[in-house]
Amino acid sequence: MSAQHNKTSVAAISIFASGGMAAAKFAVGIAIGSLALISEALHSSIDLVATIITWAVVRVSDKPADEEHHYGHGKLESISALGVTALLYVLAGGILVESYSRLREGTPPPTISAVPFVVLVIDIAVNLWRARALHRAARETRSQALAADALHFASDVLGSFAVIIGLILAALGFWWGDAAAAAVVAVMIALLGLRMAGSTVQTLVDRAPEGAQEKATAAILGVPGVIDVERLRLRMVGATTFIDTIAKVPRTYPIDRVEEIKRKAQAAVDKAFGDADLTFTAVPVARDNETVRDRIMVIAHNSGLAIHHVTVHDLGAKLIVGIDLEVDAGMQLDAAHDIANTLERSIQEEFGADVEVDVHIEPLEPELPFGVDAVPDRVRAIASALTEYAAGGEIYDIHNVRVRNTDAGEIVNFHCRATPSMSVIKVHEHVDAIERALRRAFPSVKRVISHAEPPRA
């Protein structure tokens, strides 16, 4: 059963129960002349009105957001609860006025019989069942309207007990017992309205639930990659928790990594709140462990430049930075030089004017042109040569050799193995030697792409 169906079903059942019990108490109260019982019947009538409103509201409040209601329709539940609170105060005021009038004038006590007690006992049993069912549905669906309805019926139980006490006092000869019980019912209604009004107004003014901000912050901080939560705002609309946060993430992270952090943050708040809508704004910041090379890569990335082979030498009082900058091969030298100078100035602004920056300009590698696989004999010849060049060295097991013919020349890809303990620089040196030997033997080879891997386990 869906949450929406559960909410409407419980509210509909409450309508019939409220109507039946209100009519019974009102009829008996008129018959015996009991103000307390009539007051309780009027209270139940207000509950009936409230339940009808609740039944209507919960059918609308769960509708999704639309062009005019960007946060959904959940606030309707709070507005309906506020309207019911106003009705309760009107009723409480009327009962208090009538009670005071009867106490002042000394109105005769009601006619006592077993009938009103039977009606009140049945009313207590029905209200206990309804309050429990509504409270369970309100907790499951986080419905403020159902929670207000449950509170009504729980208060009806106390009101019924007050009426019973008043009737007992009247039966014992205390003429004022019934009017006093009516006044107690009015005070209980007023206290109920005060409690409802406080909760409802807090929701309407977007007061965050107790502890919700801390829970949301902890959930987001638990996502790997989130450095800190700079700001977090939270509001409730019906059963949905809307969270707006600004979170700090490493500035070296690529966009797809930041998007992954956002998705995980949404999953984290969903787990914490059940139904959450997260607006996540990522602010890139420098981490304490960010290296000089990391910072230079960020500068180039923010400028839309392709760089590689970044070398940094720390001479104590001075930094020496070397960079390979890739630009369009057809670009004129003066334009490329301007780009290099701009990059140098950006680095100096980051590290200080005394940093020494040398930028090597080289043509950007074009995207590989369309090609076709070479014939098997050519592949075997190049594979044999690669195996020969690697023989007796640190690189072995040349495999997965592929050769493709393009307009720019042949492109060779191969895999090889090396000792696991060998450093990356050593592997690169040995593989580079093999690649150079291959290009010397096969001048038509334009590019060689190798992949070194450890031995099979």
Image (spheres, rainbow, N blue to C red):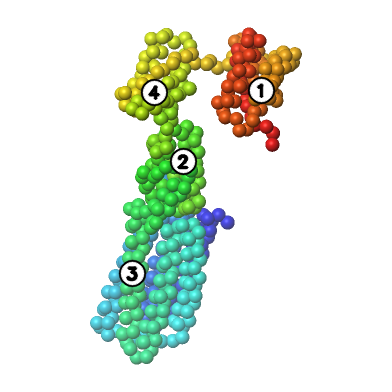
User: Which mark is on residue 191?
Assistant: 3
Separation (CA) of disc 2 from disc 3: 49 Å
Of mark 2 and mark 3, the one earlier in the sequence is 3
List the residue tagged with mark 2: 225
User: Which mark is on residue 393?
Assistant: 1
Separation (CA) of disc 4 from disc 2: 31 Å
In this rendering, is residue 130 above or below 356? below
* Amino acid type assigned to the residue bearing label 4 in the image: Ile
List the residue tagged with mark 4: 320
- Label 1 near label 3: C-beta < 8 Å? no
Q: What element carries label 4?
A: strand
Give residue 305's position: percent from left, percent from top: 43, 21
Of mark 3 and mark 1, the one earlier in the sequence is 3
Give residue 216's position: percent from left, percent from top: 43, 50
Separation (CA) of disc 1 from disc 2: 42 Å
Which residue corresponds to the image point at 24% horizontal and 82% vertical from the top-left? 104
Which residue corresponds to the image point at 41% horizontal and 82% vertical from the top-left? 164
* Amino acid type assigned to the residue bearing label 2 in the image: Gly
> In the orientation shown, which residue stands out farthest toward the bottom?
173
In this rendering, is residue 9 above or below 416? below
